[in-house]
């Protein structure tokens, strides 16, 4: 039986994970958050005090890293060398470090193989930076989800503020600009819209509107086959 794959790429803070998770529930697909895998790798490098600019050291360290994805109650868990690190990788520090670690070939090769294997055996909606271009070039639907840097910074500010975390919206916007630059200009698999991806700019859309839009794009292609 055919597996269906949906690829969602886009810059940091565009709402990819919230939206992909929700669509996965609606379509009964597995949600794969590939950023979490790069974050787990970054946590490993941080703990080992490996300088992310040192390609040789990063490459050697990759041989000692085993990352596994598991699901508990439908929620993705990232297991780093036997330890569930899911709750430890959502910080800004790890996000920035993940972006720095992700430019190395050795890291990407390892992650892409793992991601392809997951998609080969299940219906998945996978989000990241290189899903439509490298990981799932034959995905049934590819979406490039973006929003203006101002809007992405404002969303992040509201999220942190809501948790009582002190932050500055200008600093958040600058971090987003820096991370975009790093992810879009790296040599290996930079973030870019796949030629056959549909561009969705969520700047002036609610989460529900984006979810409905992507589900209807999928239905337009596959209604009857699956839904
Ligand atoms: O989506 P995120 O913010 O959790 O991702 C963290 C970093 O990991 C991101 O800035 C770049 C890197 N990444 C990547 O290079 N390729 C992916 N498929 C997913 C994430």
Image (cartoon, helix red, strand yellow):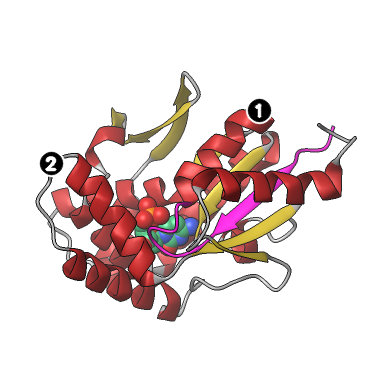
Pinpoint residue 151: horizontal percent, then vertical percent: 37, 64
Residue 6: say if magenta. yes
Of all residues shown, which one is farthest toward the top? 73
Residue 124 visible somewhere in the drawing: yes
Label 2 secondary element:
loop
Which quarter of the figure is the C terminus placed in?
A: top right
Mark 1 lies on residue: 28
Q: Which mark is residue 154?
A: none
Q: Residue at x 75, y 41 (%)?
A: 4
Residue 184: say if magenta. no
Pinpoint residue 9: horizontal percent, then vertical percent: 54, 60
Label 1 secondary element:
loop
Q: Residue at x 50, y 63 (%)?
A: 10
Disc 1/disc 2 C-alpha distance (Å): 34 Å
Q: Nearer the viewer, mark 1 or mark 2?
A: 2
CB contact under 8 Å: marks 1 and 2: no
Which quarter of the figure is the N terminus placed in?
A: top right
User: Which segment is the magenta one?
Assistant: 1-15
- Of labels 1 and 2, earlier in sequence is 1
Q: Residue at x 41, y 78 (%)?
A: 186
Q: Residues within 10 Å of mark 1 (few under 14, many from 20)?
A: few
Q: Which mark is residue 164?
A: 2
Residue 57 appears left or right of 151: left
Residue 147 appears left or right of 42: right
User: In the rendered view, would you say 109 is above or below 164?
Assistant: below
Magenta residues, dominant SS class? loop
């Amino acid at each position: 039986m055919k597996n269906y794959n949906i690829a969602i790429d886009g810059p940091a803070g565009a709402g990819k994970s919230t939206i992909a998770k929700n669509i996965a529930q609606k379509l009964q697909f597995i949600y794969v958050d590939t950023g979490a895998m790069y974050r787990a790798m970054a946590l490993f490098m941080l703990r080992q005090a490996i300088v992310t600019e040192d390609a040789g050291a990063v490459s050697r360290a990759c041989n000692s890293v085993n990352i596994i994805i598991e699901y508990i109650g439908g929620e993705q868990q990232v297991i780093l060398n036997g330890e569930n690190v899911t709750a430890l990788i959502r910080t800004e520090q790890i996000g920035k470090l993940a972006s720095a670690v992700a430019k190395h070939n050795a890291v990407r090769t390892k992650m892409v193989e793992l991601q392809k294997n997951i998609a080969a055996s299940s219906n998945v909606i996978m989000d990241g930076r290189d899903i439509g271009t490298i990981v799932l070039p034959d995905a049934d639907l590819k979406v490039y989800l973006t929003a203006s840097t101002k809007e992405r910074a404002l969303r992040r500010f509201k999220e942190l503020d809501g948790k009582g975390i002190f932050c500055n919206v200008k600093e958040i916007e600058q971090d987003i600009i820096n991370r975009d630059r790093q992810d879009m200009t790296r040599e290996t698999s930079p973030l870019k819209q796949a030629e056959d991806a549909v561009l969705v700019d969520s700047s002036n859309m609610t989460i529900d509107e984006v979810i409905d839009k992507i589900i209807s794009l999928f239905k337009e292609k596959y209604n009857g086959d699956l839904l």
